[in-house]
Amino acid sequence: MLVALSAAVMSLVVLSPAQAAPPTPAFGPAIDAYAKYVGQTTCDPDAKPGVVGFRDLLKAEYGRADLGMTRACGTGGQSEHKEGRALDYPFNAFNSTQAAQAQDVINWLLATDQHGNKHALARRLGIMYMIWDHKIWKAYEASSGWQSYSGESPHTDHIHFSFSWAGARKQTTWWTAARSLSAESVNGDRYDDLLAVSPDNTMRLYPGTSGGAFGTSSEVGPGWSASFNRIGVGDTNADGFADILATSTDGSLHYWHNSGRGTFTKLANSGTGWNTLEWFAVLDVNGDNRADIVGRDGGRLYWYPGEGSGKFSARIFIGEGWASFPRFVGGDADGDGDGDLWGVNADGELYFWEGNGNGTFSSGRKVGAGWSGFSGLNALDVNGDAKADIVAVRTSDATLWRWSGEGDGTLATAVQVGSGWSGFRPASH
């Protein structure tokens, strides 16, 4: 449902590849110990979730497919690839751009954080060792720095990453601490942000604040005409920063990657055939930290599981009877890590469905009335309490209102948090 982005937007957001590394969520001072060396002891060549997640971070930033995470059991030699806890990601040491990218990634992983933790992100991701361009860095010998490496491969066409079991299983703080970060925070903090298209077709960012309101807006980029008939926001690759998804009237789905530095980069067309949907919401249905899409096609509701980096699996049928709910939104009402749904029916009644974490939802129950006079319905955690709130525009006077979530799908009394919203199109969360 999306046409290609305008040249104006493209020129605004494209980054120089050698000036970037994957974005980083905000972390507290608690951090993982350095990974100890644990070599291959079994053969289980299925890629482990932490390795897949790290690969998705690199692919979202640099756009290249990996060179492998697994290796057949019968292949000679010992390797963490045979346990699905290693990754070879392509960087060419003889290509100046890719060599600079490789150095960016290494610097990013081994930098001291704001709390004084050395090699902070390598520890948070559970990286056991890295090999690149004739050198090896070992977490279990971190004080020795980079050491010379003379193995069979010089590793000049890729960086090899081997992970601890905790890192491979997403049990390190990169993954566990990041779960408390909201999936709709554009700047990576705990307060969800609102994106909206202004009447002049410019996308603007309204940062969430601790008080439950929104700060002064900033421009994201122009070119967001009405041909973008569905715009959604969610963290598609579990990096703690919300990305943009949109559909256009030709049935295309498009994806813009959040750099974590205030810009979005248009990557690729993420699919076609989306023009049958009358409405969609972006939320993490199954609690894997990757945003999914829930869409209404006539009276049927479908779940499109997120695969990371703006890609989605084939849709899965959720249920019938949704034609009577022309509008719905998704968010984590109770902070359990999986998404829930609210919907408004033709009579302006608000209903709530609790997610079960597997693509199914509990029976709907009425939690409010009087919603006919509101548009731009959104579910997002504005005040950072891990309970989704609802934000909407009152059409009679173009004012913006917030209903704080109580944690069970019910909502507190509405509070006005803005004015002057005539002609704005808030992006769906």
Image (cartoon, rainbow, N blue to C red):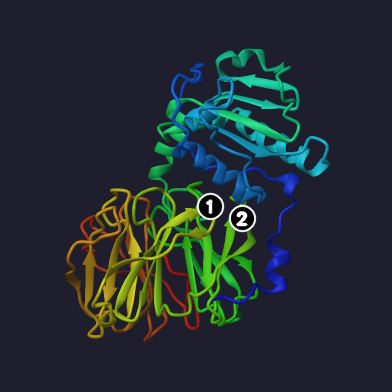
Q: Quadrant of residue 324?
A: bottom left
Q: Nearer the viewer, residue 48 or 335?
A: 48
Q: Which residue is mark 1?
A: 187
Helix, strand or loop at mark 1 = loop
Q: Which residue is mark 2?
A: 262
Q: Can residue 99 be seen?
A: yes
> In the image, residue 249 lies at what x, y percent?
54, 82
Q: In the rendered view, does 92 fall on the left or right side of 48?
A: right
- The amino acid marked with disc number 2 is Gly
Task: Please give the name of the residue rendered at 44% of the width and 26% of the height, measured from the top-left corner.
Answer: 165
> In the image, residue 394 lies at what x, y percent?
36, 80
Q: Nearer the viewer, residue 369 or 282?
A: 282
> In the image, residue 205 lies at what x, y percent?
54, 64
Q: Are marks 2 and 1 in contact (CB under 8 Å)?
A: yes
Q: Residues within 10 Å of mark 2 (few under 14, many from 20)?
A: few
Q: Nearer the viewer, residue 273 or 329?
A: 273
357 is higher (above) or lower (below) than 268: above
Q: Quadrant of residue 153?
A: top right
Helix, strand or loop at mark 2 = loop
Q: Quadrant of residue 228?
A: bottom right
Q: Residues within 10 Å of mark 1 (few under 14, many from 20)?
A: many
- The amino acid marked with disc number 1 is Asn
